[in-house]
Image (cartoon, rainbow, N blue to C red):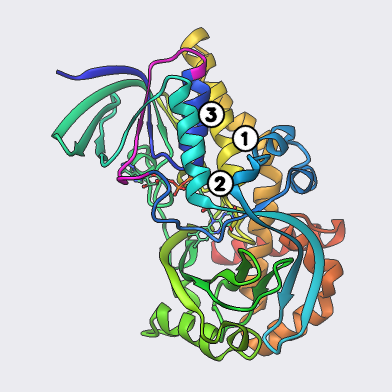
Amino acid sequence: MVEEYDVIVVGAGPAGSVAAYGLARSGFKTLLVERRREVGVPVQCGELLPTPQEMSDLFPNSPRAQRLVDVPSDIIVNRTRIMRLVSPRGRKYDFQLHANIVDRSRLDQYLARKAQDAGAKLVLRTRVTERDPNNIIDMRGPGGRTEAKARVVVGADGPRSLIAKSIGNRYDRPDVELSQTMSFTLADIETDPSIAEMYFGEHVAPGGYGWVIPRGFHEANVGLGVRAAFAAPERPLRDYLHTFVKKDPMVAPRMRGGRIIRRIGATVPVAGPVRHTWSENVVLVGDAAGHVMASNGGGIPTAMVGGELAAEAVAAHLERGTSLGQYEVAWRREMGRELETALSVLRVADEVMRSDAITEVCMRLAGSYFLEPMIRCRLPLAVDFAAKSFVKVLQIGVQ
Ligand SMILES: Cc1cc2nc3c(=O)[nH]c(=O)nc-3n(C[C@H](O)[C@H](O)[C@H](O)COP(=O)(O)OP(=O)(O)OC[C@H]3O[C@@H](n4cnc5c(N)ncnc54)[C@H](O)[C@@H]3O)c2cc1C
């Protein structure tokens, strides 16, 4: 027998759990399906979440973003106040950016529990393997194969979303549009707990950057993201990470003797929002929708904002028959400009920062004054205009 729901949410990451919470709280029969055996485990994240105050600067059109990132204090393991960008030759560019370093598995579990407490049914160890145009969902779980049907499906199934594919999205250039990451959590190291660091240069992370995000005085998430189109052919990702951790003159001395307590390999979509974030009976949220700040890879706040907006649009659709297209109107209003700017920054960087020498010069010319807004998904007006024009010229060139 096919069980029927108002909504099936696929994926219990931040996007899916926030969406499921909103829908269940509004009284809709909601199923939240997660393929993992435990929500949030293993952690696939640097765990940096800007503070509510920073959110008002990062996403000024989304007051809800401040509320959503205001997580309970027992989820926070450290607080940073400086963002440090490091050039290929080791020059440091510091600016203030206050962030909470969260225990990501605890955050995901907290959000999923809220959804359950509001009435959503969570099923674990269950993978969605197919969605047909009538929203019949095929699932494989401990009990074997099952089917369920929903009036609306929320695709919150991450960067390689099956639900996104089912409504016609695809990556034309995965080697450019997806960043492959690898990272460790290292214990028994020495690090300044107030500074989060980003390392640039093709010798560190071609098409991406390396990071050191402190979880305290003696523990940090250390990793990098690389895009295949920019990397040396045949050079494995673990080789880049090994060089970064063991040989980088600014990183290696602090990591010596460190103990690896977690290893992560995951994908970050950096191509901006996907072409179709909704259809007549589906909405996409979080990474599945490409809602990641392309210039810094951050996607937790946008996942939560998108999750809540999706819940509101789906509720209105089920109650009053309004179009699910309202969801796209809403996410564009609250975070569209920032996501677009972040993408412009990345595209310009892709064209300009082709070698360590050029990256070094660009970072010196830009200085903290220009680098800071770029990381914050914002550009000084003149640069914004120049960047957008540059991207337009590139697009015309490609056509
Ligand atoms: C290495 C790394 C570091 C990062 N660091 C940061 C950071 O410091 N700060 C930040 O803001 N962002 C960071 N991000 C990005 C951030 O983790 C994501 O943007 C965020 O998790 C998106 O949330 P989501 O709910 O959309 O997707 P996810 O958190 O990926 O959740 C998707 C869920 O769907 C489940 N799922 C997938 N397919 C299926 C299926 N077929 N059936 C059932 N379940 C399925 C998955 O198991 C998963 O639990 C980082 C990403 C990576 C990879």
> Magenta region's main secondary structure?
loop
Any mark on residue 331, and which? 1
Residue 30 covered by magenta stretch: yes
Q: CA distance from mark 2 to mark 3?
A: 13 Å
Q: Nearer the viewer, residue 148 or 221?
A: 221
Residue 291: give its label. Answer: 2
Q: Quadrant of residue 154?
A: top left
Residue 195 seen from this side? yes
Is ligand 1 closer than 8 angstroms to the Cβ of mark 2? yes
Nearer-N-terminus badge (3/1): 3
- Quick one: 361 or 90, which is closer to the camera? 90
Query: For residue 301, what is the image quadrant?
Result: top right
Quadrant including the C terminus: bottom right
* x 55%, y 65%: residue: 398
Q: Amino acid at mark 2?
A: His
For the record, the magenta segment spans 25-38
Q: Are marks 2 and 1 in contact (CB under 8 Å)?
A: yes
Looking at numbered disc 1 in the image, what kind of residue is underneath it? Trp
Q: Residue at x 37, y 41 (%)?
A: 168
Q: Earlier in the sequence, mark 2 or mark 1?
A: 2
Q: Nearer the viewer, residue 190 or 222?
A: 190
